[in-house]
Amino acid sequence: MDWAVIALLAAVALPFATAAAIFALGEARTTARSAVNVVGAAGTAVAVLACAASAWQGRAGGPLASAGIGLLDIGFGFEADMLGAVFAVVAGVLWLVTTVYAIAYMSHSPDRARFFGFFSICVGSAIGIALSENLITFFVFYEMLTLATYPLVVHSGTPAALRGGRTYLMYALPAGAALALGVVWLHVLAGPVSFVPGGALPLGLAATHPVQLTAIFALLMLGLGVKAALFPLHGWLPAAMVAPAPVSSLLHAVAVVKAGVFGIARVVLEVYGPDAALLGLTLPLAALAAFTIVFGSVRALAQDDLKKRLAFSTVAQLSYIVLGVALASPLAIAAGIAHLAHHAALKITMFFTAGVVAEEVGAYRVSELDGLGRRMPVTMAAFSVAALGIVGIPPAAGFASKWLLGTGALDAGAGWVVAVLAASTLLNAAYFFPIIHRAWFRAPRAEWATGPDPGRAEADLRMVVPLVLTALAGLAMGVLAGAALSPARWALFVAVMEAM
Amino acid sequence: MAEALLAHMPALAVVVPLVAAPIAFLAGARWGRPVALVASALSVPVAFALAWLVSAEGEKLRYQIGGWEAPLGIGLVVDGLSATMLLVTAVVGFAVTVYSLGYFADKERYRFFWALWLFLLASMAALFLSADVFNLYVCLELVSVSAVALVGLSGQRDALVAAMRYMLAAILGSIFYLLGVALLYGAFGVLDLAHLAAVLGPDVTGQAAFALITVGLVLKTALFPAHFWLPPAHANAPSPVSAVLSALVVKGSFYILLRLWTDVGDPSYVPGMGTLLGVLGAMAIVWGSVQALLQERLKMLVAYSTVAQIGYLFLLFPLVEIAGSHVVDAWSAGVFHAVSHALAKSAMFLAAGAVLSRFGHDRIDGLGGLSRRAPVTTMAFGLSGITMMGLPPSGGFVVKWLYITAAIESGAWWWAIVVLAGGLLAAGYVARVVVPGFAKARDDASDLDVDAGRLPRRMEFAALALALAALALGVLGQPVLDLMAVGSPASGVIPWTGQ
């Protein structure tokens, strides 16, 4: 078999194999389980990078690697293409980092076999979503992700966790039903739908069946909008913050929520294509995304709970991606795709930080962070870099996203987006700067004044190193935005193909 | 030698469990167990061989017992549908046998289980191979008799009452069925399914016969509102019996309905019948799910889930009634549901039974922390729940997919809404069990005995294996879809849509 096909299959299969091994090893054999977990995650990271390499090699002539099995006429298919590679690499590589973090973070927690097993299934589902070749395969993994996330949300088993889990299911399951109806309906109308840059609907279908296509689009957006946390479908995300920090970090800042926005990107760009604009579907979507950006940011302002503030920030930031895709000019699309990677690195850093802070000094609220920079300088420095990055201060990656999005919006003739961006940036600053200010410029609480105990790291290094790495990645993506193979350049390449 | 053996495969499918049954009876409490294990294990390769034969032949196989031809002798017919049902029976039967070895460990009281169990398997196999309406009747009676006996096996009051109710419903059903058969014979003078299909005309007697037979079979299949006997019978039977009643026995009478309405006649033979069955199916889905949401005992919940899931089987009739290319999808959806539900529901009942026999109770509000106390069993329950909800990647998803496709294509889109709503309701009742499983074990809500001993592994893993099989159907189900299409009324009419 070709190396590219092997990489493709390994990228999807390895996380599931890891999950099976973790379940089989069980609760007692901690060392073996952790070893299997790290090896599985490392293998997956290599595999997704190889998928990206094959996608890059085949960027002009179509993906090198594809594989699948048939069922009815629907077929389950995988493909390592340029757009999918972005999400696959983000999910796969960050999984490795998160695994190290999580092994340390969860070291005193019960039910770890269950936790890490389902965690691996979630990552496998996210990679499956990324590398799906058609809408059916996408849907299969999307629903697997829905279910596999649940045990992680309720992991602690407290009444609050069970409530959070219930809220999550109340949103996610009906959304899945809407998505199922949309997917089958589209299948009946248009036949098997493979993702194709520039749209996959049969020629002329938009002219003959505009109403049905519009209804299908609405159903698909309803189904995908829940994970993408589009207003008014976002309510589950803040509630899901009861989950342990690694879950909030990788799943609720990256894998799960980006599965939603990634799905929207696939549907808008690679299923509907130009028909989306023709049918007048992109403008309402863009307007909804713009509203969500402002709404999420305003709600974030009022949150004292650090993870909830980050969650509302995520609600807003995800809609940057949706907005970029909906505006449909090449630069705007590029902004959306690039932001998928940029926001992942930055926001996972912040959630990692929130977890370390909670674990190390027991602080959960913004108002409890006074002078924390003295106690945990490295951690808070990483947090600050990420926060500045999301606000859009150059050179961290968020600036590149905003710049591309602004210029892309002007290209698309949507000048109003610039106003949204400006408002959003001010709001981002308004909810992140107080945290930075408290951490560095407020008088520290008495127990922190002297800094970390001498001769001891500020926190478990297995948690500090991952968050430093992700912060550096967020910084590098911004500084090197113009370099070959940076997410921004990669995204521009994809965007040009999509817009052709 | 090998060829001679292959030629007798249809007979072997019945003969193996049928011969083993009296041996198990005579062998007594101790040696009945290995006899049952060997017989049910042998049934699996026999069923696979039959499936292979039918697939290779590409059409119906006929087998004449003693070489006597149709109107005189008893013929067995194997087509894709029969082979599929036989395969499911063999696979579920084997898993349930393995489970039962743990479940009935050192229970002198259950020494008759093995013989009855093998007899039930033999009757099921004979039913799926029967080629005429009277033989079908005989097999159906044999199935009912052994199933009723198995329900009452524990001798406890609840079980005996439930068995009695079950028996009365079954007898009533048989009376209707037999009346219908008599009318058919009077009107057309034939009993063989193929001959009947050839001579069936728009005749009032024939229509009345079909209606009577349908009433009888609806009673036996426990389609809403004739489901009243099912929940107590399925919930109070010993758990392996519950599993096989819900998974296989109700499918036996459904199988005959399917033969009559899609093989011999079609749903338009009696105007409105298809729609009526579909409406009852939809009501079953809603009523059964709502009742499942309200139950206090786990096994009752699972039994009401069966009431709901039976409803999905009947959605195929209104969709098949409307002419069009979607008929294949609708027919396949119904049959595939019979298969995937058989696997998932047996897994679910086995898991529920494992909980009950390990912790001594199955009150749902006392299951807090289950996922830590019994992770494999919780996993089996949860995974089989995915099939009940019809979510991917499970056989239930393929069913949902085919039904929604058929509904949209035929223009009767409301059936799609029924299917989707049923999935959400199923999520609700599955969550009732799984959610407390994740609650902290030390919560007051839990009265799972910490000191309860471990279950025999084979019990836990038999359930898990069935649940995983139901899940695998959602991805690797194509061979099953191909198999059941062989010689089916739906195959060859119109190719799969979209291709």
Image: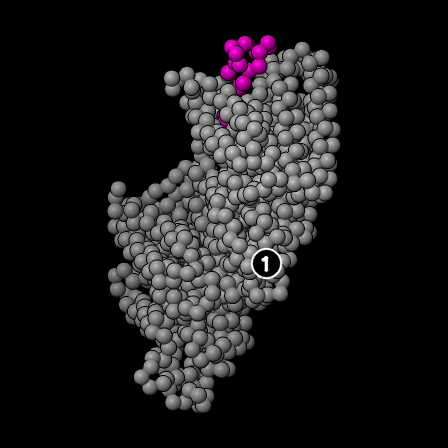
Which image quarter is the N terminus of chain B in?
A: top left
Residue at figure coordinates x 37%, y 45% from the top left: A78
Residue at figure coordinates x 37%, y 84% from the top left: A452
Q: Residues within 10 Å of mark 1 (few under 14, many from 20)?
A: many
Residue at figure coordinates x 44%, y 75% from the top left: A359
Q: How is the image coloured?
A: one colour
Q: Is residue A353 magenta?
A: no
Q: Is residue A269 left or right of residue B427?
A: left
Foreground residue, A120 or B364?
B364
- A111, above or below A125, in the image: below
- B33, above or below A318, in the image: above
Image spot of residue B98 (x, y percent): 50, 39
Image spot of residue B248 (x, y percent): 58, 34
Mark yes or no: residue A236 visible. Answer: no
Subunit of label 1: B
Residue type, label 1: Leu
Mark yes or no: residue B49 visible. Answer: yes
Question: Tag 1's secondary structure?
Answer: loop
Q: Is residue B67 magenta?
A: yes
Foreground residue, B3 or A265?
B3
Q: Is residue B348 left or right of residue A488?
A: right
Number of marks drawn:
1
Residue stretch rendered in magenta on the structure:
B63-83
Q: Is residue A54 left or right of residue B180?
A: left
Q: Quadrant of residue A386?
A: bottom left
Which image quarter is the C terminus of chain B in?
A: top left
Image spot of residue B31 (x, y percent): 52, 34
Image spot of residue B10 (x, y percent): 49, 21
Residue at figure coordinates x 49%, y 82% from the top left: A368
Residue corresponding to mark 1: B448
